[in-house]
Amino acid sequence: MNNKYRNYQRIFLIVADSLGVGAAKDSNLYNDEGSNTLYHLSLSKNNFSITTLEKMGIGYITNINNTKAIPNPISCYGKMEEISVGKDTLTGHWELMGLNVTTAFPSFTDTGFPKDLINELERRTKRKVVGNIASSGTEIIKQLGEEHLKTGNIIVYTSSDSVLQIAANEQIIPVEELYKICEIARELTLSKPEWMVGRVIARPFIGNSKENFIRTPKRHDYAVSPTGKTVLDNLKENNYDVIGIGKINDIFNGCGITESKKITSNHDGMLKTMEMINKDFTGLCFVNLVDFDSLYGHRRDPIGYANCLEEFDNDLKQLLNKLNDNDLLMICADHGNDPTFHGTDHTRENVPILVYNKNLKAKSLGIRKTFADVGYTIANNFNVQLPKIGKNLL
């Protein structure tokens, strides 16, 4: 094991998926002016309480209901601007690890997927396609789920992001078969540049009527590989551990990952992160908590989002107590998803950055010019090749 790190043997990076902290300076290009995920969700509860994050200094980053900018916070705090195009999961995470994504993946929000692509998907899977529109995942299974139960046709849909999503009831199409269908879709979308969406996503659900359809945690993402080498690749090549928790392995298509752990919820993700604190490793533990985004942001549920963030805050208190003296914790987001905003999709926002170690002197990190400052800091700590963009947060 490579032990030539500068200050910290282990870095825990937690991405609170979609927890934006205010419209980015170029939000007008995305019709997202006025968005602020954290502030707006906090207004949904009079007694909103995130005392752990408050102690870490989150009150200095944006206005938050019932949350102050307290004297003597325990963490370094700031916010980050995104330089990559778009406002989706892939570009946000890839930029965190040192890539500037300059070309947007194709999206099919207004048109649906091309007829030739759908025809070939039907031929290869021997199943008809229904849907092929932009929709919320929960809404489209309400609309087409009962037809799917009768016919076995697969439900294909997209959003304003570059995604091809396939929903199927687990009783009609077993999860493993759905995964194979998505692998076929991934292969097809890679066959032509104009079809190459960022992700193909399997969306299994259960239930026997539109009144009780519910998506299960067996979602699986099939992403394209990053457009270049990331900090994760450089860590792995230098024999450091790179442990992905949640959908990190999917987001990077396995590139640079040495170990991966699936999760069933944000709380499960935090429990698995705390389990890693009890294990001896040297390197990065990279965590994505997707419930904020998938269950509450996209569904425009500010109260649910607020409750979920309060649960995270409680888990975070326990995690902080378990960290060792040579552990560094970083908390950020990958984009926004304001649950009070128009539409059902991500919002172009700045994201928070909180950095904590028991012996680290708290200070303002200001407004960082790229998410890549996170990856740069990690690479610098472990003495591996630095990304072409970014600066050390510390």
Image (cartoon, rainbow, N blue to C red):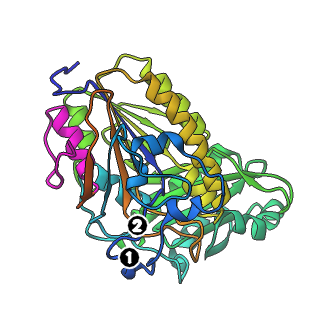
Which mark, residue 261? none
Indicate whether residue 4 is drawn in magenta.
Answer: no
Taking the spot 26% from the left edge, 66% from the top edge, the residue there is: 83
Question: Could you give the CA–CA distance between mark 2 and mark 1, rounded to whole angstroms?
Answer: 7 Å
Main secondary structure of the magenta stretch: loop
> Foreground residue, 109 or 27?
27
* Residue 225 appearing in the image: no
Residue 362 to residue 206: above or below:
above
Q: Residue furthest front?
A: 71
Label 2 vs 1, first from the N-terminus: 1
In the rendered image, which quarter is residue 386 located in? top left
In the picture of the structure, the residue carrying the numbered disc 1 is 27
* Residue 112 appearing in the image: yes
Taking the spot 41% from the left edge, 46% from the top edge, the residue there is: 70
In the picture of the structure, the residue carrying the numbered disc 2 is 349
Task: Please report contact status of discs 2 and 1: CB closer than 8 Å, yes or no.
Answer: yes
Taking the spot 19% from the left edge, 27% from the top edge, the residue there is: 7
The residue under label 1 is which amino acid type?
Answer: Ser
- Location of residue 109 in the rendering, given as x and y in whole percent from the top left corner: 52, 78
Numbered range of the magenta stretch: 371-394
Secondary element at tag 2: loop
> Foreground residue, 297 or 309?
309
- Location of residue 225 in the rendering, given as x and y in whole percent from the top left corner: 34, 52
- Location of residue 97 in the rendering, given as x and y in whole percent from the top left corner: 28, 48
Residue 73 to residue 21: above or below:
above
Instruction: Left or right? Give the position of 254 relative to 227.
Output: right
In the rendered image, which quarter is residue 310 located in? top right
Instruction: Left or right? Give the position of 249 relative to 125.
Output: left
Indicate whether residue 390 is drawn in magenta.
Answer: yes
Residue 288 to residue 4: above or below:
below
Quarter of the picture holding the C terminus: top left
10 Å neighbourhood of mark 1: few (<14), some, or many (≥20)?
A: some
